[in-house]
Amino acid sequence: MEAMATLVVFILALAVIVAPLSIKIVPQGREYTLERWGRYTRTLVPGFNAIIPIFDRVGQKLNMMEQVLDVPSQEVITKDNAMIRVDGVVFFQILDAPKAAYEVNNLDYAILNLTMTNIRTVMGSMDMDELLSKRDEINSRLLTVVDEATNPWGVKVTRIEIKDITPPKDLVDAMARQMKAEREKRASILEAEGFRQGEILKAEGEKQSAILKAEGDREAAYREAEARERLAEAEAKATHMVSQAIAKGNVQAINYFVAQKYVDALGKIASADNQKVIFLPVEATNVLGSLGGIAEIAKEAFSKQRPEVR
């Protein structure tokens, strides 16, 4: 009876000791490989997992979340023999825990070295100008090569980014001088283009001004000709009226013609630039007297044209 009690106590004590060893709690985002006698048997997923103590043991604890590796700075010789320094980052995620645990030794170190090697290969096949202007193309080519190489390890490389590309100092100085020359060239071109546009606009303005002036002159000539035409019509009408008066024996009409010619002649003499003194002939008073005849003729003519008011 006493032996039985001792056995029960021993079993209970053994259960208390073994029970914690048979339970494995795996946190979220991680997976454990389980080995029995050193051989992989299964993968412990996040949550509660039961194992057989002493026979089973946890092999490797793997981080299944996306991880990032810093690629240290390294020297790269470009296709045109320029020495540059390059660094970057790699983002990857373990998709198959057994492969990541047993297909490669030191997974992070392997991915890092694989990336650095391919950076030298890809960037060494390009010229300096291509490296500085085609960074997206470099990242894409690196991602394709590295992801394909790490596929057997159960790893998915999601992104590779080149952070800094540092050319040598003399090359940076040469690039700065080239950039300055390019900017000065663009400034000169823009200045010449601005001058050309200014001259074009000025010529167009002068052309438009000349056209407007010509149109104004034409309009003025047209109006002047129209005025002369109206004046000629008026003179012809007046001459016709006087001719009719003369035909009817009106002596004042003759005086009108004589006075008109006389006044015109005096007007020309008075408007001459070198004429300072005007001598009036003796017949001037007679001419002035004929003005009364002109008034009488005009009065008679207008009275004939005016319609009768009833």
Image (cartoon, helix red, strand yellow):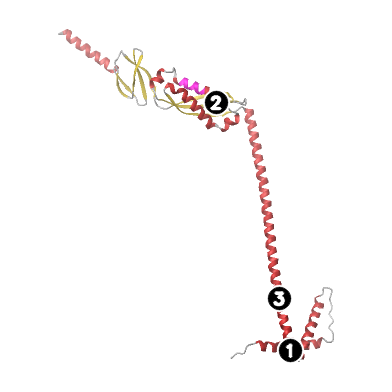
**Closest to the observer, 220 or 45:** 220
Relative height, residue 306 to residue 123 (above, below): below
Q: How far is the residue under mark 1 from the one under mark 2?
A: 117 Å
Please state which of residues 238 and 195 is positioned toward the viewer in this rendering: 238
Does residue 249 belong to the magenta stretch? no
In the displayed structure, does residue 9 sit left or right of residue 197? left
Q: Earlier in the sequence, mark 2 or mark 3?
A: 2
Secondary structure beneath label 2: helix
Q: Which mark is residue 92?
A: none
Q: Quadrant of residue 220?
A: bottom right
Q: Position of residue 66 (x, y in %)?
A: 42, 27
Q: Earlier in the sequence, mark 1 or mark 3?
A: 3
Q: Is residue 6 left or right of residue 299?
A: left
| 128 over 204 or under it: above or below | above
Dot 1: few (<14), some (14–19), or many (≥20) neighbours within 10 Å? some
- Asked if residue 74 lies left or right of residue 231, the reply is left
Return the residue at label 2: 122
Residue of label 1: 245
What residue is shown with label 3?
A: 229
User: Camera-side residue: 309 or 269?
Assistant: 309
Counting other residues with Cα less than 10 Å from the Cα at mark 3, is it few (<14), some (14-19), or many (20 or more)? few
Q: Which residues are magenta?
A: 108-116
Q: What x and y, as percent, mark residue 82?
A: 61, 26
